[in-house]
Image: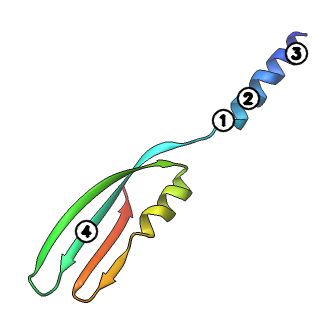
Amino acid sequence: MKKTLVLGAFATLMMASCAKDYSCKCVVADSTSGTNNTVTTVINGKKKDAKAACEAQNVVLGTVTQTCTIQ
């Protein structure tokens, strides 16, 4: 009976998600005016998923470029 409980507890821990909070830092640069703004958002999830979500925010619109990276 004890082995079953220990095995069940171990299995539960192994199934637990490894979700954490990750900072996504985005730098918005306007090449016309030469200004840079930094915006940091928090993404909760696994590192691989958080990195993909952060990098999906990379945008180029005319003279404005937004580059995002996980911190």
Question: Residue 4's image quarter?
Answer: top right
Query: Are circles 3 and 1 on residues that touch, CB within 8 Å?
Result: no
| Element class at badge 4 | strand
Is the C-beta separation of discs 3 and 4 under 8 Å? no
Position of residue 1 relative to residue 51, above or below, is above
- x%, y% of residue 48? 55, 58
Q: Are marks 2 and 4 in contact (CB under 8 Å)?
A: no
In space, the residues marked 2 and 3 are separated at their CA atoms by 14 Å
Rounded to the nearest angstrom, the CA distance separating label 3 from label 4 is 53 Å
Report the disc number at residue 43. Answer: none
Query: Colour scheme in the image?
Result: rainbow
Considering the numbered disc 2 on the image, is that residue within a helix, a strand or a loop?
helix
Q: Which residue is mark 2?
A: 12
Count neighbours of disc 3 (C-alpha within 10 A) and say few if under 14, some if 14 to 19, many if 20 or more.
few
Amino acid type, callout 4: Val
Name which residue type carries label 1. Ala
Residue depicted at x 49% and y 56%: 50
Residue ID for mark 3:
3
Q: Is residue 42 above or below residue 56?
A: above
Label 3's element? helix
Furthest residue in direction front, as rendered: 61
Q: Amino acid at mark 2?
A: Thr
The 10 Å Cα crowd at callout 4, few under 14, some 14 to 19, many 20 or more, is some
Along the polypeptide, which appears first: circle 2 or circle 4? Answer: 2
Can you identify the residue that label 1 sits on? 16
